Amino acid sequence: MDLNELMKKYADHIGGQYTQYDPDHSIIIIPVSGGRFQTVLGTIKKNELYNRKLIVLHSKVCSSSLPIDYKMLLEQTAFFNYCRFVIDQNYLQIEAVAAVDNLSDDTIKEMLQEVANLADQYEMKLTGSDIH
C-alpha cells in the first residue's frame, strides 16, 4: 500500500492540498465545514510489539496546557469510528491508527476525513477559534 499516493489522490479529489515529506510521512490539508481546512499528518510506522506496519493519521486540536475536561473527551471517544484523543508534544490531538494489512483505500479515506472533521470540531469547541 502506498499511503502517499493514496493521500495525494484523495487531496486532488476533495480539493485539498498534499505534501510528501519522505516515503513514510505526508501531509494533507482537508477542507472541512465553514470554509475551514484541517491539516492531517499521515505516517507508516512499524509496531515492534506485533511486528507489523501501522498507518497513523493525526491532527492537532489545541495546546494541552489549556483547561480541558479530559473526562468529557474520553466519553466522546465512544462515538468515534476510528479516532481517539492523544497528547503528543504538549498538544491535544485526534489520532486514528490501523494495521496496514487488509486495510482498504476507502477505509483510509474515511479515517482521514474523520480525523480532520473531529480535530476541527474539537478545536472550535475547546478554543473558540481556528488555530490549526
Image (cartoon, rainbow, N blue to C red):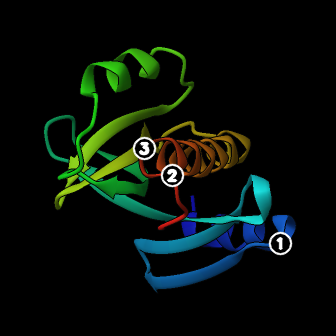
Q: Reading the chain from its start, which is encountered first: label 1 or label 2? A: 1
Tell me the element at label 2.
loop
Q: Is residue 15 left or right of residue 65?
A: right
Tell whether label 2 touches label 3 (CB within 8 Å).
yes
Residue that label 3 marks: 126
Tell whether label 2 touches label 1 (CB within 8 Å).
no
Q: Is residue 107 left or right of residue 92?
A: right
Q: Reading the chain from its start, which is encountered first: label 3 or label 1? A: 1
Q: Residues within 10 Å of mark 1 (few under 14, many from 20)?
A: few
| Disc 3 to disc 1, C-alpha distance | 27 Å
Residue that label 1 marks: 15
Foreground pick, 97 / 119:
119
Residue that label 2 marks: 128
Please name which of the two marks, 1 or 2, marks the residue nearer to the observer.
2
| Disc 3 to disc 2, C-alpha distance | 6 Å
Foreground pick, 104 / 58:
58
Foreground pick, 69 / 61:
69
- Rendered location of residue 98, percent (x, y): 44, 38
Residue at the spot x=22%, y=47% of the render?
A: 87
Q: Is residue 32 left or right of residue 86?
A: right
- Rendered location of residue 17, percent (x, y): 69, 79
Residue at the spot x=35%, y=49% of the render?
A: 93
Asked if 10 appears above or below 58 in the picture, the reply is: below
Tell me the element at label 3.
helix
Residue at the spot x=56%, y=41% of the render?
A: 118
Residue type for callout 1: Gly
| Disc 1 to disc 2, C-alpha distance | 25 Å
- Rendered location of residue 34, percent (x, y): 77, 57
Residue type for callout 3: Leu
Tell me the element at label 1.
loop
